[in-house]
Image (cartoon, rainbow, N blue to C red):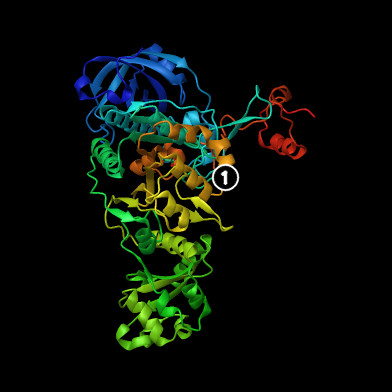
Amino acid sequence: MRSHYCGGINESHIDQDVTLCGWVHRRRDHGGVIFLDLRDRDGIAQVVFNPEAAESFAIAEKVRSEFVIQVSGRVRRRPAGTENNTMVTGQVEVVCHEVSILNAAATPPFPLDEHVDVGEDVRLRYRFIDLRRPEMLKRLRFRSRVTSYMRNFLDSNGFMDVETPILTRATPEGARDYLVPSRTHEGSFFALPQSPQLFKQLLMVSGADRYYQIAKCFRDEDLRADRQPEFTQIDIEASFIDEEGLMGLTETMMRDLFREVMQVDLPEFPRMPYAEAMRRFGSDKPDLRIPLELVDVGELVANVDFKVFAGPARDPKGRVAALRVPKGGELTRKQIDDYTKYVGIYGAKGLAYIKVNELSKGAEGLQSPIVKFLGDEVALAVVERAGAEDGDIVFFGADRATVVNEALGALRVRIGHDMNLLTREWAPLWVVDFPMFEETPDGGLTPIHHPFTAPACTADELAAAPAAALSRAYDMVLNGTELGGGSIRIHDATMQSTVFRTLGIDDEEAQAKFGFLLDALKYGCPPHGGLAFGLDRLIMLMTGASSIRDVIAFPKTQSATCLMTQAPGVVEDKQLKELHIRLRRSALTSAGDAATDGAKPQG
Ligand code: ASP
């Protein structure tokens, strides 16, 4: 139906006849001449209708925004002075000699102009129109280039693409499962995969050797800004390989990808142990573009009368840390109050600070509500430890170590952005030497990655001191975002059982839940490992999109619904019966409220 894409018309087509198809982006009537901006996936072309071509002109008069039309005409240079240098097609226009309306369009719910601010709810409700906006389509195409690049890279490195089941059993990655009731097995449920973890490991047992998949994963979590209930991973696994092999290969893939699709040369990826990342940056995904660091001051304040500091300083699970902000002395009371509120989100009960006005005056040169509690000597000592100079401010966190790390870690990033401290555009790194487990609030242990991650010690050592054990896991981090993570896996049945037992999963439960894995480990499982990249987050970072929803064609809202299809929706009573499910009364009421489009359940 067409000879060219609208966005592909340029000076090389002058005097040629072309046929374009697309949507009417804008219509302008100019003293008897009608101009249509015709838009398709590739861009916008200007089409001119002269009154002499009466039939076409009459049609052009009728068309409205978002009508779908087909136009044939001749390309010519735009008259001098009317060129548009901001448009790829801005030097030329198409003089129409034939036009037909392929479909009319109702007035769109919002204009497709990039300058118009439209509420996200409306955009998501009419996603099919929202995606017509050039910047949205551009992101989708970019995403497609990235996946096709990765496929090529992995294919040419001997990886094979294997699909794994969506209807499966729970795969523990630390989130809640999405469950699907079985019709044929009353009372039984499938779980949607939180990741293809176990299947990719089983493929290694099968001898597949190198696997990848662009895999949909499902996690029923309370959503934060960068999470979606269903998301996509570039999932990778390989046999007879160690961490060096896997990190080397995937680092090369990432570096080549950035060069290929963004013309960006990523620097070398430094490796940083988890403990160092937490100590210096309060985070296991430090943003190394920001030149601020946390400094421990616990032993300097352990003996002061000020309980707020001395308490956590003496508590083995506590931490007292300082964050020096060069030139932070300029921060206003209001800004400091805002930062205090901000760290409150992370559980910090306050935000102590010392402004360093003039160090040569000793404690006199410090300005702070806490100096009187710390005493002059200690106040000067912590300021010195933080490396502060005249004009700086030093913030403090004193609490459980987890709270201090989260709060000061987040504050560090926030101030880095607020004060424009970023030293470079891209800062990748590997975080390594993770602990195997972390403590749960009830004193139990939970895996930091997943329970199939190999420890960096023997099974006996692990059983003796699980909390101290390190794992063979690695995370790739870019600009403070975890791009992906993985590990060398347990390939030995005894080790796997030890890990299950450490997690409080007894042999019977392990057999019931993961019997197939324990079996597979007995039948000649090769050493293997892998990792998975979060595709959505990667695309978000590469395109500079402000929300993960902007790089997913049909995303869910923050409350895990689809505003366009109204999913999740209520279902017919008959379907529920087939699934052997009866709803509780409270569910009936709220389901009826939430999804007004669905059929109402009866009784
Ligand atoms: N399955 C892991 C995850 O989804 C990644 C991996 O260990 O390969 O985070």
Does 203 appear above or below 367? above
From where the camera sits, is residue 329 visible?
A: no
Mark 1 crowd level (few <14, some 14–19, many ≥20, 10 Å Cα)? few
Residue 593 % position (x, y): 70, 37
State which quarter of the image contains the C terminus: top right
Q: Classify the position of ligand 1 by quadrant: top left, top right, bottom left or bottom right.
A: top left
Residue 418: which quarter of the image?
bottom left
Q: Secondary structure at mark 1?
A: loop
Residue 280: which quarter of the image?
bottom left
- Disc 1: which residue: 506
Residue 533 relative to residue 596: left or right: left
Residue 319 relative to residue 421: left or right: right
Residue 565: which quarter of the image?
top right
Q: Which residue is nearer to you in this view: 83 or 534?
A: 534
From where the camera sits, is residue 488 visible?
A: yes
Name which residue type carries label 1: Asp
